[in-house]
Amino acid sequence: MNARSALGRYGEELAARRLVESGMTVLERNWRCGRTGEIDIVAMDGDVLVVCEVKTRRTGGFEHPMAAITPEKAQRLRGLAERWIHAHGGAPPGGVRIDLVGIVLPGRGAPVVEHARGVA
């Protein structure tokens, strides 16, 4: 595993923990749909299906992780959500929401974890 994928895995673990701590149930992690892409975390928030994108950055020159959802990325996540729903028996009664968990790892100290609901 290279450093970038290790960073991503660590961030996804922190994100999953944050979602569970906020009362959500994680259903799947790293769900792949052929060449279309991957959903980092699929969770339930009550009766709402949550498709969660996780972005992890070290402090430094890259954009803040919360700026990572472009219109193209949002469209891709909506398409992946539709495919997940189709593969798993239909939409839940509360519908679907796309969230973003952004994690910044400082040089020192604890990671900063932000959860934005309904970003796309």
Image (cartoon, rainbow, N blue to C red):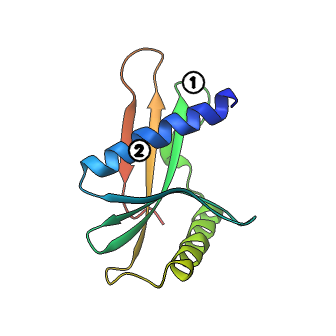
Amino acid type, callout 2: Ala
The secondary element bearing badge 1 is classed as loop
Tell which of 81 and 100 is nearer to you: 81
Task: Relative to 116, say whether 86 is above or below.
Answer: below
Q: Which of pointers 1 and 2 indicates the residue nearer the eye?
A: 2
Task: Relative to 96, say whether 45 is above or below.
Answer: above
Identify the residue at horizontal 38%, vertical 32% (top origin): 112
Task: Relative to 17, say whether 100 is above or below.
Answer: below
Residue on which disc 1 sits = 60
Identify the residue at horizontal 59%, vertical 76% (top origin): 83
Residue 45 in which image quadrant: bottom left
Looking at the picture, how far across and down is residue 120, in whole percent? 48, 66
Instruction: Kindly report the distance in space between the C-alpha atoms of the residues bearing marks 1 and 2.
Output: 20 Å
Residue 31 in which image quadrant: bottom right
Tell which of 81 and 63 is nearer to you: 81
Task: Report the disc number at residue 15.
Answer: 2
The secondary element bearing badge 2 is classed as helix
What is the total number of numbered labels drawn onto the structure image? Answer: 2
Q: Earlier in the sequence, mark 1 or mark 2?
A: 2
Identify the residue at horizontal 29%, vertical 75% (top origin): 47
Looking at the picture, how far across and down is residue 1, in whole percent? 68, 31
Q: Residues within 10 Å of mark 2 (few under 14, many from 20)?
A: many
Amino acid type, callout 1: Gly
